[in-house]
């Protein structure tokens, strides 16, 4: 019997959170009356709420292809970027909840967005149904290959020495954005509520998605950034950028020589990116059940596992319940960090 390929990556500490008792997030819609056999028409539409070229786009296109084959219908990808993913989510919620429009959810648009001062105009736990997680991954702190900075302590010392702040690139409300904000606070080495305590002096430049900001780092328009590891692999292997640290709790198997932020002097530091497939609440229960079952098969396939492993991504626990648990925990975590930790207060 042919053995199914599987990942053998070290477990990230956040994975243990997904195995806890169920969070209070509904994962199934109520059945509606008689509905037509789904899907009776094609194509379906998967909204990826970020521009072409980043982690979300690559994962979305792969899932659209494999899931479309699984259910026997084409799934077209529609990239609708803006406001850290919130624009795409809002557009999906304006469409009929009939199972023909899917949304690629993620940490930014479905968790961090609910912690920011300006609400996104929707509630991810109330308005969306979780179908299953697609990936979890580390961020990596990057500088140009010719930068004199080689360790986190070099960055901290340089930021404090310079009269003008180092410019960093970010996508609003992304895991990389929050990782940088958390680094700025943790590097202050004093409680943010203490008078006179200020964050590490870095200045952010917002971008709509991950592809352009990496190129601007290579071209010298910005000095550093956090980005999903899979997005950085090509530039790292080509020697165009240098990694100072990773945001996971353990070193990454594809970058074993790169320390974690926790090892580099920020104990307990961990920020991970993640994504999942969602539909609008009100979608008929039989449609949800079929989509969730099909997605489980896609995520368990050898083709998906090989692709994820090659990009340094970890396959998370399968199913809607694990997705809903993580969503609830991440919303709570980032609301607490933004409120109590002073993240994005300046």
Image (tube, rainbow, N blue to C red):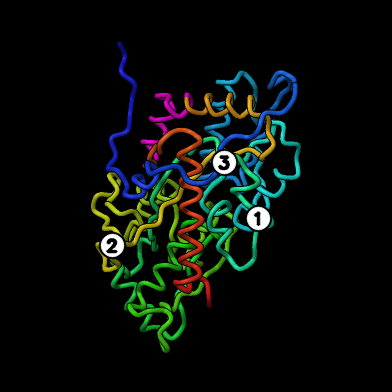
Label 1, on which residue? 82
Q: Which corner quadrant holds the N terminus?
A: top left
Label 3, on which residue? 26
Helix, strand or loop for disc 2: loop
Helix, strand or loop for disc 3: loop
> Is residue 141 in view?
yes
Residue visible at 66% across and 48% down?
89
The quarter of the picture where residue 310 lies is top left
Q: Position of residue 143 (x, y in %)?
A: 39, 63
Helix, strand or loop for disc 1: loop
Check residue 262 for magenta coloring: no
Magenta residues (range): 297-312
Q: Position of residue 319 (x, y in %)?
A: 47, 33
**Which one is earlier in the sequence, the residue at label 2 or at label 1?**
1
Label 2, on which residue? 262
Q: Is residue 132 left or right of residue 8?
A: right
């Amino acid at each position: 019997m042919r053995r199914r390929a599987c990942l053998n990556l070290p477990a990230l500490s956040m994975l243990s959170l997904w195995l806890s008792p169920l969070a209070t997030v509904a994962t199934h819609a109520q059945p509606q009356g008689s509905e037509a056999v789904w899907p009776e028409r094609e194509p379906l539409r998967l909204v990826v709420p970020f521009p072409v070229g980043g982690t979300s786009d690559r994962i979305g296109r792969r899932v659209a292809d494999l899931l479309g084959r699984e259910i026997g219908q084409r799934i077209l990808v529609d990239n609708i970027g803006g406001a850290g993913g919130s624009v795409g989510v809002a557009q999906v919620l304006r469409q009929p909840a009939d199972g023909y429009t899917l949304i690629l959810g993620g940490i930014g648009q479905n968790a961090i967005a609910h912690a920011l001062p300006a609400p996104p105009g929707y509630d991810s736990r109330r308005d969306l149904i979780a179908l299953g997680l697609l990936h979890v991954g580390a961020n990596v702190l990057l500088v140009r290959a010719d930068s004199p900075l080689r360790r986190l302590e070099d960055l901290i010392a340089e930021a404090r020495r310079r009269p003008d702040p180092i410019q960093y690139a970010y996508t609003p409300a992304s895991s990389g954005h929050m990782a940088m904000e958390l680094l700025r606070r943790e590097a202050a080495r004093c409680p943010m509520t203490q008078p006179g305590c200020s964050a590490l002096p870095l200045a952010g430049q917002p971008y709509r998605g991950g592809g352009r900001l990496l190129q601007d780092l290579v071209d010298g328009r910005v000095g550093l950034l956090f980005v999903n590891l899979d997005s950085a692999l090509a530039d790292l292997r080509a020697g165009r950028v240098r990694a100072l640290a990773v945001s996971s709790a353990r070193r990454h198997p594809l970058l074993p020589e790169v320390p974690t932020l926790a090892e580099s002097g920020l104990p307990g530091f961990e920020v991970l990116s993640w994504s999942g497939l969602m539909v609008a609440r009100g979608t008929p229960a039989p449609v949800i059940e079929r989509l969730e079952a099909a997605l489980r098969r896609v995520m368990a396939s050898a083709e998906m596992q090989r692709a994820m492993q090659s990009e340094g991504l970890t396959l998370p626990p399968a199913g809607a319940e694990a997705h809903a648990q993580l969503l609830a925990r991440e919303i709570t975590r980032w609301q607490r960090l933004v409120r109590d930790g002073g993240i994005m207060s300046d």
